[in-house]
Image (cartoon, coloured by chain):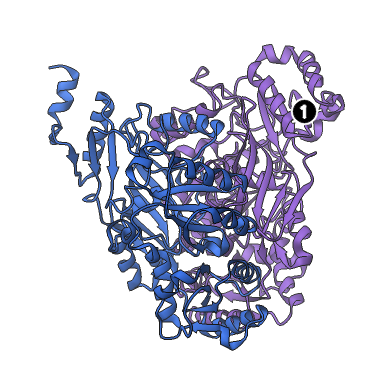
């Protein structure tokens, strides 16, 4: 592990491992409590694989009541808890702690109800995102948010991270497509926020829980809205001679009132990598390649595609192809969807960053990224959900080389700070987790963070639920500007860790 | 000089007055710090268009934010507008009009109901109440359009959350939490709101139909079709006379479904929709852009309840349960219309007392919905719960309230006793 500081290990808890395991076996099926090293190994990391940590124990509850009992027990005995869905998260949100009980939600894998009349699906949280669409597509419906990991990521994890995806420009992220959840709080309380109706009154706890990265409760049931699938979907593949031109095109399309279903940009480095990898047939001479997708009824899509074409041409597009069939459209996307594995071929490891910027700052930010790439001597390729300003730079490095990982972390941090500097945000859709924790001070001052921590304390007074995530370990950061933790040494070992 | 006197001596404000009307954030901070120190409860107001919604409560002083107004930053190409919380919705809408943009969530104008004339209130009030209009099922509620905010917590500290970009949730999404909190958590100072281009055109398919069951069937089919409607309402016979429009060829009860987008596509979708619903020419009218806008504006403004003295309830239930809920209301004299494609029932009761109210609440609860008392007589207001909450959520709400406003000085009791 690199320079990552986690909450202090409670040795008293470590020494009671066997007792805790046996206590837990007292109220959940004993085969669902894992304690051997070999059983624990699969849970040592999530999608942020550069960081690994074995948990003390893993439990696999099967009902909300079991989750409640586990949390109540851990709360009473001051045992840290880390919840985990499918483990595909990219910011280390479900990375275990050495002295934690990891709650693996994998057994919550059933869809409970499909309700076409109210256009919603009620499901257990570890059902995959894509499985929801699969369950309703024969009736012509689908679930809109489509994170790239949708084949594997769980809907509960989506709620915890407020996942977005290619189509969140038009359809919003998880928070905009969620109707209700059942959640268990750290003291064991089981409650429901929202349901099949919109805007349940009272404080919007549904909104608060969404994107709270497993710090406020464990989700045991999810109700999402489903939409009628659009009748026609068409995409245009457009090449631009410069990033500026592509960026201007994005801004104008939006300003003209066409809201595409998705609008993706890849830079030249990534276009080349994906072409080599997936033979997508992208224009390799273009400095920026854009996929614009519209959906709706035939006339609607036709009108928007024409408008987008005109705007692209005004912005010096060097090539433009409109999909003539669904097969061709999927081929346009094939390259973009293979962007990550394509980078995997170029370097031993890559770190996928996730920042959000104003659309108009695209060229400026990409120029800065390429300057930083030279500075750190690490190659980078850029994918961009251009419509909603969500940037995914892929930094290539070698995880076996500590210096390379360190440089990669600093490079990534510099990119995110720049995103904040131009008016953007530290996270687009991957969450803060452990990855961007110390950067929170770039976006928020001490008062802002303190307000958030007060909410945390209100629901989890002992700070046992997923501690060490999202919020800086060193809360003094606001005064100190930037936090560096070297070799695990910290100046403030006694400051509460959230 | 004691510490308190020292702090007071820096004050340019007269703390003997009962109504504060600050025009700068520094003044608001000063007022709150003072009230925090002295345990003085504050009633927080914007343009008072909705301040009658909610429980009556005791407050020593009033904080009137109507002078804390103005557009701070509007970037049409970035699709956001940043404003001070006391800015009137009217001013924001006028500014957006210049760029052919809009607030897609169509907030209700409660002015007609409470004062007989338009008063869409301040943006701070719109966010604090989170009442979204007819596009709700398609574009989300007010809370879905709040990108970020700055506010003052109960200790007088300035806090912020979110930002101006669409994807900006870093840490807890406090923008959601403050939406619909009726001013009980923070005093909003600045709001960054997502704006969207206006659709090229809007048309409305009006179906002549007085029957609720059939209306709900039309709405269900319409909203589940790929024609992508952005509004669906039902007005029973007694409200028909409120809609005198050139293109409306019949009177009486009506079901209306709105389609928006590029002109060609709207025409195509309207004709498709009428085919899918199996309608014949004699039972339908199509409102063009202008008349369609008038129709939905009347809906947004609750104009059918314009002369209503009291007893207006806002009831939200799953669409599947709307019919049964209204059938169970048959013992009462009611007038209602249905918005949100079947899920939102705006209902006035000829007679409303604690007993009837409790019966209604039970019905709604049994159908997994919720109910908000919008306009009720003072004696009923004093004794009834305006909002309903279960004990677990009350406990959590209490904790959250305390985390923002530890001494309970912001609108104490406006939502619930003790919060």
Residue A82 left/right relative to A423: right
Residue at the bottom extreme of this rendering: B281
Q: Which residue is mark 1?
A: A58
**How crowded is the residue under tag 1: few (<14 C-alpha within 10 Å), some, or many (20+)?**
many
From the rendered image, report the letter of the chain displayed in purple.
A
Chain under callout 1: A
User: Quadrant where the C terminus of chain A lies?
Assistant: top right
Q: Residue at x 16, y 16 (%)?
A: B2
Picture colour for chain B: blue
Q: Is any part of residue A385 visible from this angle?
A: no
Q: Secondary structure at mark 1?
A: strand
**In the image, what residue occupies the spot 55% across and 40% down?**
A436
Left or right: A370 as drawn, with respect to B184: right
Quadrant for residue A72, please give it: top right
Using the rendered image of the protein, determine whether residue B354 is visible from the camera's viewpoint: yes
Looking at the rendered image, the quarter that the N terminus of chain A falls into is top right
Q: Position of residue A483 (x, y in %)?
A: 48, 32
Q: Which residue lies most toward the front here?
A: B331
Residue A166 lies, in percent from the top left, at 63, 61
């Amino acid at each position: 592990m690199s320079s990552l500081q986690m909450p202090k290990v409670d040795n008293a808890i470590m020494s009671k491992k066997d007792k805790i395991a046996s206590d837990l076996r007292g109220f959940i099926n004993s085969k669902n409590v894992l304690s051997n090293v070999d059983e624990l190994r699969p849970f040592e990391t999530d999608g942020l694989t550069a960081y690994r940590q074995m948990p003390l124990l893993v439990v696999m509850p099967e009902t909300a009541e079991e989750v409640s009992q586990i949390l109540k027990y851990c709360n009473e005995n001051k045992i840290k808890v880390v919840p985990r869905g499918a483990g595909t998260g990219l910011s280390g949100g479900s990375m275990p702690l050495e002295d934690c009980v990891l709650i693996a939600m994998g057994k919550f894998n059933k869809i409970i109800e499909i309700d076409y009349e109210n256009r919603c699906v009620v499901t257990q949280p570890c059902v995959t995102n894509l499985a929801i669409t699969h369950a309703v597509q024969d009736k012509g419906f689908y679930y809109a948010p489509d994170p790239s990991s949708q084949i594997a990521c769980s809907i509960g994890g989506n709620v915890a991270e407020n996942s977005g995806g290619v189509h969140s420009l038009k359809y919003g992220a998880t928070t905009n497509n969620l109707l209700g959840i059942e959640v268990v709080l750290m003291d064991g309380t089981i409650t429901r926020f929202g349901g099949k109706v919109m805007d349940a009154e009272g404080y919007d706890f549904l909104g608060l829980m969404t994107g709270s990265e497993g710090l406020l409760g464990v989700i045991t049931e999810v109700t999402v809205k489903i939409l009628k699938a659009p009748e026609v979907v068409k995409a245009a593949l457009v090449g631009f001679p410069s990033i500026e031109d592509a960026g201007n095109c994005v801004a104008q399309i939006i300003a003209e009132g066409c809201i595409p279903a998705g609008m993706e940009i890849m830079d030249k480095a990534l276009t080349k990598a994906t072409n080599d990898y997936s033979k997508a047939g992208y224009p390799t001479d273009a400095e920026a390649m854009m996929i614009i997708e519209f959906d709706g009824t035939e006339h609607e899509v036709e009108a928007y595609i024409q408008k987008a074409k005109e705007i692209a041409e005004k912005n010096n597009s060097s090539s433009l192809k409109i999909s003539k069939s669904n097969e061709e459209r999927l081929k346009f996307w094939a390259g973009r969807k293979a962007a990550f594995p394509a980078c995997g071929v170029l370097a031993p490891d890559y770190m996928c960053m996730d920042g959000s910027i104003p659309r108009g700052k695209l060229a400026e930010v990409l120029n800065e990224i390429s300057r930083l790439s030279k500075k750190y001597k690490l190659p980078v390729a850029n994918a961009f959900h251009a419509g909603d300003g969500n940037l995914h730079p892929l930094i290539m490095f070698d995880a076996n080389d500590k210096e390379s990982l360190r440089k990669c972390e600093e490079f990534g941090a510099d990119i995110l700070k720049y995103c904040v500097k131009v008016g953007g945000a530290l996270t687009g859709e991957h969450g803060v987790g452990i990855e961007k924790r110390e950067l929170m001070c770039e976006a928020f001052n001490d008062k802002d963070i303190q307000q958030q921590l007060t909410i945390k304390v209100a629901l989890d007074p002992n700070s046992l639920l997923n501690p060490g995530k999202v919020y800086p370990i060193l809360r003094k950061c606001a005064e100190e500007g930037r936090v560096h933790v070297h070799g695990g040494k910290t100046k403030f070992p006694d400051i509460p860790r959230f | 000089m004691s510490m308190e006197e020292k702090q007071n001596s820096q004050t340019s404000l007269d703390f003997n007055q009962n109504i504060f009307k600050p025009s700068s954030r520094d003044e608001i901070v000063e007022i709150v710090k003072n009230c925090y120190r002295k345990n003085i409860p504050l009633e927080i107001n914007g343009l008072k268009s909705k301040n009658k919604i909610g429980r009556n409560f005791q407050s020593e002083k009033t904080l009137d934010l109507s002078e804390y107004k103005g557009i701070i930053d509007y970037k049409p190409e970035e699709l956001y507008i940043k404003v001070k919380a006391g800015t009137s919705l009217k001013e924001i809408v006028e500014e957006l009009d210049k760029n052919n943009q809009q607030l897609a969530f169509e907030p209700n104008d409660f002015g007609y109901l409470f004062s007989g004339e338009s008063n869409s209130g301040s943006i701070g009030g719109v966010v604090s109440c989170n009442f979204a209009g007819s596009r709700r099922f398609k574009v989300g509620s007010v809370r879905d359009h709040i990108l970020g905010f700055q506010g003052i917590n109960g200790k007088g500290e300035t806090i912020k959350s979110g930002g101006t970009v669409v994807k900006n949730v870093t840490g807890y999404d406090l923008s959601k939490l403050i939406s619909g909190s009726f001013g009980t958590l923070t005093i909003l100072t600045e709001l960054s709101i997502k704006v969207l281009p206006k659709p090229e055109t809007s048309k409305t398919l009006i179906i002549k139909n007085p029957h609720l069951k059939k209306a709900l069937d039309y709405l269900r089919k319409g909203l589940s079709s790929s024609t992508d409607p952005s509004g669906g309402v039902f007005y029973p016979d007694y409200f028909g006379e409120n809609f005198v429009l050139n293109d409306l060829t019949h009177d009486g009860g009506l079901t209306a479904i709105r389609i928006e987008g590029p002109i060609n596509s709207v025409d195509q979708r309207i004709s498709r929709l009428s085919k899918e619903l199996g309608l014949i020419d004699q039972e339908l009218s199509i409102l063009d852009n202008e008349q369609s806008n008038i129709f939905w504006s009347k809906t947004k403004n609750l104009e059918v309840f314009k002369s209503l003295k009291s007893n207006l309830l806002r009831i939200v239930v799953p669409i599947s349960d709307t019919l049964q809920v209204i059938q169970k209301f048959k013992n009462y004299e009611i007038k209602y219309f249905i918005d949100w494609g079947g899920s939102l029932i705006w209902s006035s009761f000829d007679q409303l007392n604690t007993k009837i109210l409790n019966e209604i609440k039970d019905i709604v609860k049994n159908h997994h919905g919720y109910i908000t008392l919008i306009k009720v007589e003072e004696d009923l207001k004093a004794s009834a719960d305006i909002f309903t909450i279960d004990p677990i959520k009350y406990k959590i709400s209490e904790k959250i309230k305390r985390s923002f406003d530890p001494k309970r000085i912001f609108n104490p009791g406006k939502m619930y006793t003790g919060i």
